[in-house]
Image (cartoon, grey):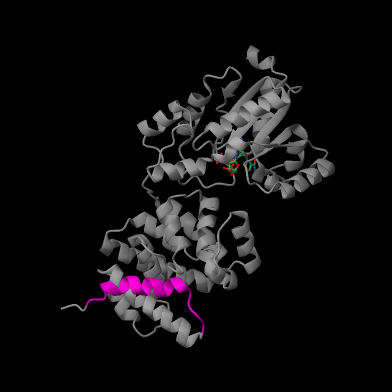
Amino acid sequence: MDTQKKVRKLAIMGGTFDPIHMGHLVTAEEVRHEFNVDEVLFVPTGHPPHKSHINMTTCEHRYLMTVLATAANPYFKVSRIEIEREGVTYTIDTIKELKRIYGEEVELYFITGADAVHKILGWKESTELLQLCDFVAVTRPGYNKEELLRKVKMLNEQYETNIHFLEVPALAISSSDIRRRLMEMKPIKYLVPQEVENYIKKHDLYDYNIQLTEDEKACMYDYVASKLSPKRYAHTRGVVEMALEYAKLNGIDYDETFIAALFHDIAKELPTEETLAICDKYGIALDEYERTHPYLVHGKVGAVILQRDWGISKPSILDAIRYHTLGRLNMTDLEKAIYLADMTEEGRSSYKGKDEIKRLAQYNLDRAMYKALVSSNNYITNILKQEAHPIINELIQYYKQFDIQED
Ligand code: NAP
């Protein structure tokens, strides 16, 4: 195309854009100004190598939202190059194709989130990629810049590449936060362009019920099996079976229960240093007790791993994983089902009261919770000779009201 031939400096805004928001637009405009580029080309991802497609909004929706968001800016364009490519999409292929379209002499700047810079050496043909274009690593407020700057310096020296760094305050907005707000029925006005908000509402995006296919479930089983020891995996399968039974009998969503049960212990066997590093990186707050008993944190870390590796951000599922170890006040039925299934799955060694908790969990989750909490507390104080986390006693006091004798 003629117009594309005139472009000497092109910025490529690569991203999932699920959904596109004001932070992306401010970033693109800032880069255009800062690097004096002729055009910013938004390239919504197809199937990126680092993400499962489960729960990612379809390419077409993400593409159309990007078109709507950028239509008013004469310097912004949107490309279908990645969403039309079959299979997994790699940035190197995109860059090579853009060089072909715009001409070999075009100067390219690839804009992406700073986290990508940390992982860039793992990308396909990274050495060549680093030679083909400059990178602009953008960060949101609160990002640990020191570590990033060290990495950028190392890459620039070692690979003779050009990685620039740009802090964009408007990136306090994030796509995941917008999805979360929508699921929690909170407003997103002024966080995304009005046209994008209208589009989201019209197509009911992000207010989704998860529906897994058999292939997706098999994929998840394989992933979990690859992360756990055979013993832990057998326990996990037992929890899935038990939790699904409780879900059926108590009217809890089947697929949400399946995912929460399957991933509940995904972080259980991580070394302590890795667990704490993830807490640090993702800002997971730990109380005094958790800091001295880090194995209890695997629920919170497991939720992060599910979100990070599978793009699943439905709060109900994440909370069921997050709170399956200690419980919390105001637990949902899904949270109770996972907590109880963890304590009663068939493979778990027998203890006094196990059968009763199992029987109660089939029709009275609150009463089962009371029995389960009392049993946990007894085990921790009498067998392990430890002091239980204070939440356990608080929960026992709360659930006591449901411990009414049956006729
Ligand atoms: P992501 O993992 O979803 O994003 C990581 C973080 O960076 C998020 O906080 C995200 O914020 C932010 N971010 C991503 N792109 C951004 C942008 N252009 N401007 C500002 N913030 C941005 O990353 P992604 O969006 O899927 O991927 C980013 C790009 O890297 C894509 O073009 C992808 O194809 C490419 N990539 C290539 C390879 C490979 O070739 N092997 C591997 C990984 C990624 P928001 O959620 O708010 O956007």
As drawn, the residue found furthest toward the left would be: 407
Left or right: residue 312 versus residue 403 is right
What residue do we see at 70% from left, 30% from top? 109
Q: Which segment is the magenta one? A: 386-404
Nearer to us in this view, 168 or 199:
168
Nearer to us in this view, 261 or 318:
318
The x, y position of residue 344, in whole percent, is 37, 75
Is residue 8 covered in magenta?
no
Residue 192 versus residue 221 in the image, above or below: above
The x, y position of residue 116, in whole percent, is 66, 44
What residue do we see at 58% from left, 70% from top? 294
What residue do we see at 39% from left, 46% from top? 184
The x, y position of residue 273, in whole percent, is 65, 66
Is residue 388 covered in magenta?
yes
Name the quarter where the C terminus is drawn. Answer: bottom left
As drawn, the residue found furthest toward the top would be: 2
Name the quarter where the N terminus is drawn. Answer: top right
Q: If the picture is divided into quarters, which one holds ligand 1?
A: top right
Nearer to us in this view, 80 or 286:
286
Q: Is residue 88 visible?
A: no
Left or right: residue 228 versus residue 237 is right
The x, y position of residue 374, in whole percent, is 37, 79
Q: Is residue 302 visible?
A: yes
What residue do we see at 53% from left, 32% from top? 22
